[in-house]
Amino acid sequence: MFSTTQSVRPVERQPQGFAGWTDEVPAYQFAPADKVKVQFTLAPELGEDVVVGPDGMIGLRAAGQLRAGGRTAAQLQADITAAAAAKTLNAPMVTVALTDSQGALVFVGGSVGKSGAYYLAGRHGSFEAIQLAGGFNPEARMDEVVLIRRDPANRPMLRTVDLRSLVDGGDAHPDVPLVPGDIVFVPRNRISEVDLWIDQFINRFLPFSKGFSYTVNRGGLLN
């Protein structure tokens, strides 16, 4: 068995499957239960407040049934504009705004109290998400917390976050603010657990490309 002082790092088997990490926040994509305000500048009486259905759809008087799930505000705005122009309005001017992000979820797994999807209310980091998931288990490796995110071009990225100094009350604050859709994984001392959880939870159940996966090695990343 490896010592608990050894480095535990997820490593790409296919490095080309990942983009370089960027802190640029991707555009929010609407999800079921989100509340959306749709306004028509030249026909304000047609404006509506709608809720994205479980199937990702919304219904508008001026535009009919449209898919909102997985669409950004700009994309949905363009969709509504085209649908309304074809259905009822001449050269409509449309604005779309998210008013309540009930679908803003992050996924937490690994050595935590209860793995699962958790609602992200406001600006929080991976430490807060782990607390929502029941906190760290006794065997948790807090210095190598894994964060997976999609970049603005919808490509997966991976980095690790050292939360030990934060937990120990140090001056440093190494945490990273989360965005909806982020995946946080807390590894255990048994390094094989990272690869197992990634395979079972991410590759099989989350909408990531099949073109990337991880393995775990001592001492850092493999090229």
Image (tube, rainbow, N blue to C red):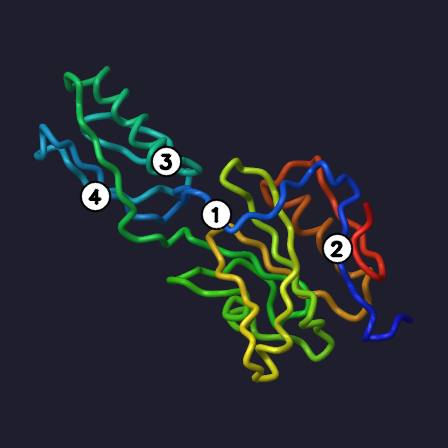
Badge 4 marks a residue whose secondary structure is: strand
Q: Which of the two marks, 1 or 3, is nearer to us in this view?
A: 1
Q: Are marks 2 and 4 in contact (CB under 8 Å)?
A: no
Q: In the rendered structure, which amino acid carries the disc numbered 2?
A: Pro
The residue where tag 3 is placed is 68
Callout 4, which amino acid? Asp
Quadrant containing the N terminus is bottom right
Against 107, residue 153 (above or below) is above
Which element type, helix, strand or loop, lies under badge 2? strand
Camera-nearest residue between 185 and 58: 185
Above or below for 37 versus 113? above
CA separation in Å, label 1 and label 4: 29 Å
The Cα atoms of the two marked residues, 1 and 3, are separated by 23 Å
Q: Please name which of the two marks, 2 or 4, marks the residue nearer to the observer.
A: 2
Disc 2 to disc 4, how far (Cα)?
43 Å
N-terminal of the pair, mark 2 or mark 3, is 2
- The residue at which mark 4 appears reads as 49
Q: Amino acid at mark 1?
A: Glu
Mark 2 and mark 1 lie on one chain; the one further toward the N terminus is: 2
Mark 2–mark 3 Cα distance, whole angstroms, equals 34 Å
Q: Position of residue 79 (x, y in %)?
A: 32, 26
Say which label, 1 or 3, has the lower sequence index.
1
Counting other residues with Cα less than 10 Å from the Cα at mark 2, is it few (<14), some (14-19), or many (20 or more)?
A: many
Please tell me which of labels 1 and 4 falls first in the chain: 1
Q: Earlier in the sequence, mark 4 or mark 3?
A: 4
Outermost bottom residue: 169
- Please name which of the two marks, 2 or 3, marks the residue nearer to the observer: 2
Residue 3 sits in quarter: bottom right
- Give the image quarter of residue 126: bottom right
Q: Which residue is mark 1?
A: 24
